Amino acid sequence: MRNAIKLLQGAGLHLSLSKTRAELAYTPYPWRPKSVLASDVRIEGAPVPDQAALVAALEPVLGDRRYAGIALSVTFSDEWVRLFMVEPPKNTLRMQDVRTAAAMRFHTLYGDSSAEWRITCDDAIDRRFLACAMPAALFSAIEGLAAAYGLRLVSLTPTFVATWNQVCRRLGRAWFGVVHDETVVIGCVDHAPRPELAAVQHLRLPADDEDGLWLADQLRGIALRHGLERPQELQLFGRYVPGLAAPGDVTGLTVTWPERDQPARPRKEPLIDLSGFGGARA
């Protein structure tokens, strides 16, 4: 009965996975989206967690099945996925053509068989679009976790995409990036006539950057490579790294960390929805 009431109220769980941690938050009421941290634990094991590692990490809070039947949404580290832009075929009419183009682009870029990856993409037929390849093993691990505790898996979203969906309308003229344990994923934004992703670039954080010029140099190279105007501002989200960039009067690049400077804003409807891995869609 207790779980039935939660279901009627629209309660939900959100699991955030990084390479080292699993953070589980519970939202009892969708109309009052204040989450309660239910668990924040370290993940032990392989670089990409398997089902056993996830179940072991979350057993203390999910083991009594108090959340059985509750909707589960998951965001996960971009360090596990491959994000890339795809040019749709000319005269595309069907979404199957878009998905085929994404699979072909993935093979061209990485040379891997798509059998070991779950590839999904933005539903766009008239412009370049973002695609994402998620390891099939990670998808199976999360799916198995949900089944083990009777949860309804409704969405799987890379952190980069979740961040874009939240901030794209308020970037101004800035590019943005998501910082993880070892990498930063840069979103190159074309702002006319509305904000759209023009390119995505994974960068490995340097072990040493005493002068703070590394990031500005990288963005300058990315802009040249993709024929884009060099950004004057970069907004960073995720793990805060002090001294990642020198002051703007030195580099010509202003770097801000909005999450440190302002309260979180309510989530808006996404411009890009990549939550549909294998049919699990919110």
Image (cartoon, helix red, strand yellow):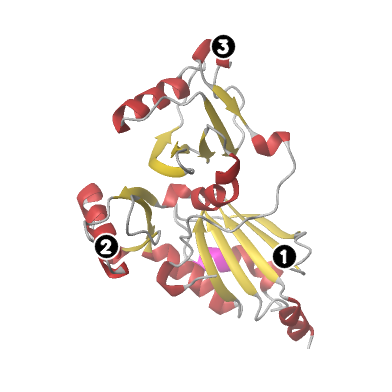
Residue in view at x 67 percent, y 75 percent: 63
Residue 26, disc: 1
Residue 116 is situated, as x and y percent measured from the top left of the image, at 30, 64
Q: Which residues are magenta?
A: 51-55
**Outermost residue, top side:** 250
Total label count? Answer: 3
Amino acid at the residue labelled 3: Asp
Identify the residue position indicated by label 3 in the image. 249
- Identity of the residue drawn at 25% across and 49% down: 110
Q: Main secondary structure of the magenta part?
A: helix
Residue 76 rendering spot, x and y as whole percentages: 52, 55
Name the residue carrying label 2: 114
Q: Residue at x 76, y 77 (%)?
A: 9
**Which of the numbered marks, if any, corresponds to residue 222?**
none
Judged from the image, the secondary structure of the residue bearing numbered disc 1 is strand
Q: Marks 3 and 1, Cα distance to the nearest angstrom?
A: 43 Å
Of circles 3 and 1, which is in front? 3
Q: Is residue 153 visible?
A: yes
Task: Quadrant for residue 106, please give it.
Answer: bottom left
Q: Earlier in the sequence, mark 2 or mark 1?
A: 1
Q: Secondary structure at mark 2?
A: helix
Tell me which numbered mark, 3 or 2, is placed earlier along the sequence. Answer: 2
Quarter of the rendering occupied by the N terminus: bottom right
Whether label 3 touches label 1, CB < 8 Å: no
